[in-house]
Every structure is written in C-alpha cells, then in structure tokens.
Image (cartoon, rainbow, N blue to C red):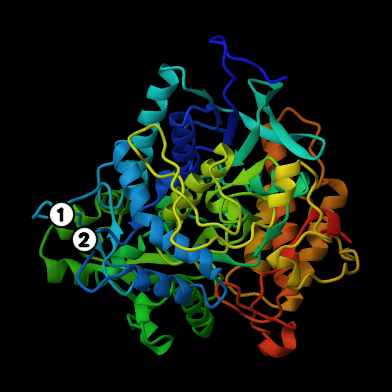
C-alpha cells in the first residue's frame, strides 16, 4: 500500500540530491517544479562547489548562432578534443539539447552577458571552431550562474518545495534489496540519515588529489567513493585534465597568504583573446609543440609546458602568460572589463598583468572519468543517479573540450530528473518531451531513437545489477584480470593528505610512466592497509571521511592509468607503447567495479 499525502493522494516521490554545483542545483529545481519532494545536501555552504569558481563559460549553439556555427560543428569540436574516445551519442545529446538548458537557466534567473546590439555575447575558446561561449559576469560565469540558482533554491526552500541541509558530509548510501534508498551523513557532530526513492550524486570532482589544483577544498572525490562502495561501476579514471595556466604566486605573496591559498585559474578565454605563453627566456614556445599553439586542446598545452620545462632543466618551474598583447590590441582597460576577477586577483598577488606577464603552471582541473551512467544519469546500481563531473557519460572522452563541463551538468542533470520522474521511454522508441511544471522546460528531448539502456532491466525490477550477465555496451571493452597485490618493500612515508597529494602529483600527474605508477600503487597499497579506503571510516570527523575518499580515488586512478599503457588524450605516458600492442581495443572505455576487486588484489 502506497503512502498518502495529507490531501489524500499519493505522496510525492522523494529525490535526494547530494551536491550544490550546477548539476545539483539545477536538478533539484527541475525535480521540485515537477512536483517531487526534494532534499538537497551539501557538505559546505551552497556556494562551495567547482561551479562557483568556473570562469570560462558555457558552450552552446543557440537558435541564432555565430556566423557559420552549427550544432554539427560543436559535435565535431567535442569529438576532436575527446581524442576519439567520446561516446558519440552522448555528444550528440549534449550539443543538440544545449539550447534547451540555456533557456532553462534563464528561467531560473541567470542573466548572460549581451553585446552592444543586445544579443548574447559569444566568446571563442581553445579548440572551438566558432564563438559559442556564453558568459555571465565576464570571467565570473560560474559564480553568476551559481548565485542565480542558489537564490531560486532558497526561494523554493522558503516555499517548502526543497529541503536544504548544509554542512552535511554524506558518508554512505543506504541500500534495501540491492537498491539505493537513502543516504547517511554527518551533521553537527551527529550521524543522521534520510530515505528517498532515489539519490542523485552531483558532488563534483577530485582536484584535491593533487598538490596544485584549480578546485576548491571540497573537491575530495566523495561521490565517486560513495558510488564505488555501493557497488557502482566507474570508468575512464585515467583521464584527468590539468588546466595549463594556473597562476603561480610569487614567493612573498605565497608566504603572506599561507599554504591554504587556492591557486588562481587564468581562464582559457584569455588565450582565446590572443594571450601567448613565454618561457623564462622570453621565448614563445607553443608553436613548436602544436599547430594551434596556445589554442591547442588544454591537455596538449599542459603537457607542452611540462615537456618544455623539463627541456629547460626546470621541471618544477613555471612559464609566463603574456596578456599584454591583448591589452595593446584591444585598448587600455580591456582586460579589466573582460576579466575583472582575474584582474583583481592578480593585482592582489602583486602582478599587474597589463604591464607584466603572469607566472603560470599546470594544475589539476577536471576529471573526465567517474561513475558510469547511461544517457539518463542512471548508474549500474538501481536507485542511484549521477550527473556533472562525478559522472562518466562518455561525453568528455579522453580530454574535455573547454566550457563543456557546466553544460554536461545541465543536460544530463535534466535527463537524470526525467529518469527519476519516469519520463524516459523504452529503448526502442523515440523520446517524447516531458515538460516540467515551471514554464515548459523540456526534461527529455531526443531527435533519434535511444540506444539500449544498460540498466533498464535492473531499474525496472529493482534487482541488483549483474555485470556478468547484463547486456551492456561496455561489457565488450577491456577489463583486465586482477593482478598482484600492491605492496611496498621500502619504508613508506606515513599517510597524510599532503603526502598523498605530493605522491599523485609526482607519479600520476601530467606526465606518467609505468615505473612511477607502480611506485604510486605500492605506496597507496601500504597506506590502505593502515587506513582502509574501501570501508566507511568509523569516525565523526568529516576530514577522516574525505581522506578515505581521496585514498580510494587515488588507488582507482592509478590502477586505471597502469592498465592503459598507451597515451591517449589527457592520459600521457612517457613510456607509451603503440596502440595495437597496448590492449586489444586501445580506445575502448576502461570500466571497473568493486565486485571485480581491482583496487588491492
């Protein structure tokens, strides 16, 4: 017998959203507007997310695009940047449906920058063939979008349509008969729980795996760890994107600011405007590494910087971004108007980028891999959805195209809500449009028949996902047999977050090889014996849970990087073997789940 609401009808289904970046906020609003009961949990304040710090913008081909731009061109650019590793259907969905979610953001109060004619101001960024980047507040797009969505969420909370629980560290997913049925979390020193009909993970990324990152302190791989421990499949974890131009603070500024200062990302849009990279000798070097020079895909630029520094004998050094050429060409005051946040932050660090170059180096930025989902955000575990950076839809491939990340959170967050609401058709029919209650925002849209849903049967029956027998596309792709246990015979450095981040930066960062990865695996394995990563810590200290999540994510990333022996996209191995000798199908998606015991075995 189903529960009833006070009005006598069936009680609304409850969606639990974990995370308050663009995917979490947008999905929560869509679900609430469609009549669902929504509980939104965030481990800090609502603004503590990667979204808030995003500068570059959101890519979309609008109804009135830039001259010559088309959805097909956006698809082609995304596939090219992804190094042949993208799921083409996922890319088609992303680029075709982008304009729907731009309209959705506007309905929720986001105001995009306009040009002098009152039309959307479209910017050009690296690896895009045409201007199609929308901004909200210049180089503070993430903050502008987040603030608008947060205001709308708080309005919904005041109206009793969304329950927001802040400063809640989710520690585990509760399961009933193989289906996710809620979450357990720490709040004000207590362990609490909330039950629901489904859980949507929108927890963002894991930049804190590395010593230098553009991500905020909350990016500690929480969602990936939660999903893995619940038995969900993960994929593409070897592909971690490093943003090539993160400001390196001068020594005196760094000392004054303290070690906790987060680096400043110098947006890719700056290079799109014409800024160039120089080495310590004042020489421009990028044309020697790629035909597109500073506008090459970001993995190419990051790797080129690392290789050039090694050539100069200064692998831990930095190069310089010269934006003075932009100011000279565009006129005095242009940089301050176009990039107000960067102008302010560089000035605070003692650098006037209109008069001197900015010291920059690569920093961990975005994880292409994550919790494996279908095109509607459904994972291999019934009742568990994922969207945004925590998910792996296959849309980003081996290297994300600039400004596609916020878009992915929107498109696949909406589709996850459609799946939760039951607005997803069977796999062999065309997808109708399910319209939300808030002004007609389409929740589902597809112009072609859907591909087979790899968890359709599991979600329909509530039965546990069985990777050995289910008909899933990724079953055909390479999953190696368990290897020997990772052990270290040397005297290991005791585990600490600082030690882990240094290890990952040195051994599994921009440039990797088999020897470095084996060493990393051994050290991580020795730490996991003392600090078990696959189990939930018995602690009320949120930091201990974050440490366990980071250790687990490190083990998974290193294992995936060892298995992919050839370079591809953002995964670069200096000992790369030819593709046909690496694995049978080198460009296939590498998938693993906890059932296969691939971390410590």
Q: Who's the residue at 64% across and 32% down the image?
A: 169
The first of marks 1 and 2 along the sequence is 2
Q: How many other residues sit within 10 Å of disc 1, few (<14), some (14-19) or many (≥20)?
A: few
Q: Is residue 166 left or right of residue 52?
A: right
Q: How far across and down, in percent of the image, does residue 333 sit?
A: 13, 57
Q: Is residue 361 left or right of residue 294?
A: right
The image quarter containing residue 218 is top right
SS state under label 1: loop
Q: Is residue 105 left or right of residue 363?
A: left
Marks 1 and 2 in Cβ contact (< 8 Å) = yes
Name the disc covering residue 437, or none. none
The image quarter containing residue 14 is top right
Q: Who's the residue at 44% across and 60% down the image?
A: 94
Q: How far across and down, in percent of the image, does residue 492 sit?
A: 82, 59
Q: Relative to 3, is 297 above or below?
A: below
Q: Who's the residue at 56% across and 56% down the image?
A: 375
| Viewer can see residue 362 | no
Front residue of 307/591: it is 591
Q: Is residue 466 left or right of residue 406?
A: right
Q: Relative to 307, is 551 above or below?
A: above
Front residue of 462/493: it is 462
The image shows a total of numbered marks equal to: 2
Q: Nearer the viewer, mark 1 or mark 2?
A: 2
Q: Which residue is mark 1?
A: 119
SS state under label 2: loop
Q: Could you tell me which quadrant the C terminus lies in?
A: bottom right
Q: Which residue is mark 2?
A: 64
The image quarter containing residue 172 is top right
Farthest residue toward the front? 429
| Viewer can see residue 599 | yes
Front residue of 102/552: it is 102
Q: How far across and down, in percent of the image, does residue 148 sit?
A: 33, 36
């Amino acid at each position: 017998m189903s529960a009833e609401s006070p009005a006598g009808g069936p009680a609304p289904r409850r969606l639990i959203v974990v995370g308050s970046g663009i995917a979490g906020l947008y999905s929560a609003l869509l679900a609430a507007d469609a009549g669902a009961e929504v509980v939104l949990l965030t481990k800090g304040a609502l603004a503590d997310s990667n979204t808030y710090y995003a500068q570059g913008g959101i890519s979309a081909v609008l109804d009135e695009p830039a001259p010559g731009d088309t959805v097909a061109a956006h698809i082609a650019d995304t596939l090219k940047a992804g190094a042949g590793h993208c799921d083409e259907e996922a890319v088609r969905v992303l680029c075709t449906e982008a304009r729907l979610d731009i309209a959705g953001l506007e309905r929720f109060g986001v105001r995009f920058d306009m040009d002098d004619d009152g039309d959307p101001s479209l910017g050009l960024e690296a690896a895009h063939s045409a201007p199609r980047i929308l901004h909200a507040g210049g180089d503070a797009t993430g903050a502008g979008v987040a603030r608008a969505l947060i205001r709308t969420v708080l309005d919904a909370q005041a109206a009793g349509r969304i329950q927001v629980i802040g400063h809640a560290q989710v520690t585990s997913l509760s399961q009933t008969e193989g289906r996710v049925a809620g979450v357990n979390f720490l709040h004000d020193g207590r362990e609490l729980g909330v039950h629901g009909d489904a859980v949507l993970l929108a927890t963002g990324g894991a930049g804190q795996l590395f010593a230098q990152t553009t991500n905020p302190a909350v990016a500690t791989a929480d969602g990936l760890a939660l999903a893995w421990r619940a038995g969900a499949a993960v994929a593409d974890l070897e592909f971690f994107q490093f943003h090539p131009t993160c400001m390196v603070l001068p020594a005196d500024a760094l000392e004054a600011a303290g070690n906790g200062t987060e680096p400043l990302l110098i947006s890719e849009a700056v290079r799109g405007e014409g800024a160039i990279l120089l080495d310590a000798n004042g020489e421009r070097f990028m044309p020697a590494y790629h035909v597109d020079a500073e506008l090459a895909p970001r993995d190419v630029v990051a790797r080129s910087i690392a290789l050039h520094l090694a050539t100069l004998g200064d692998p831990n050094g930095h190069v310089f971004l010269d934006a003075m050429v932009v100011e000279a060409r565009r006129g005095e005051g242009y940089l301050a108007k176009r990039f107000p946040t960067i102008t302010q932050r560089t000035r605070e660090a003692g650098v006037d980028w209109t008069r001197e170059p900015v010291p920059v180096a690569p920093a961990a930025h975005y994880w292409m891999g994550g919790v494996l989902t279908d095109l509607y955000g459904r994972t291999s575990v019934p009742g568990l959805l994922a969207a945004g950076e925590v998910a792996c839809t296959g849309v980003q491939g081996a290297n994300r195209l600039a400004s596609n990340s916020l878009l992915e959170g929107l498109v696949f967050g909406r589709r996850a809500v459609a799946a939760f609401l039951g607005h997803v058709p069977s796999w062999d029919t065309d997808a109708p449009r399910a319209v939300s209650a808030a002004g007609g925002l389409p929740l589902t849209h597809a112009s072609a028949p859907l591909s087979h849903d790899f968890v359709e049967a599991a979600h329909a029956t509530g039965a546990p996902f069985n990777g050995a027998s289910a008909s899933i596309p990724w079953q055909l792709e390479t999953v190696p047999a368990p290897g020997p246990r990772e052990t270290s015979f040397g005297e290991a450095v005791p585990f600490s977050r600082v030690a882990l981040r240094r290890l990952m930066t040195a051994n599994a960062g921009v440039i990797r090889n088999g020897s470095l990865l084996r060493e990393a695996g051994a050290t991580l394995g020795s730490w996991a014996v003392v600090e078990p990563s696959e189990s939930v810590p018995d602690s009320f200290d949120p930091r201990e849970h974050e440490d366990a999540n980071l250790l687990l994510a490190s083990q998974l990333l290193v294992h995936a990087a060892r298995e992919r022996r050839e370079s591809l996209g953002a995964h670069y191995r200096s000992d790369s073997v030819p593709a046909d000798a690496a694995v049978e199908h080198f460009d296939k998606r590498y998938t693993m789940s906890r059932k296969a015991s691939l971390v410590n075995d």
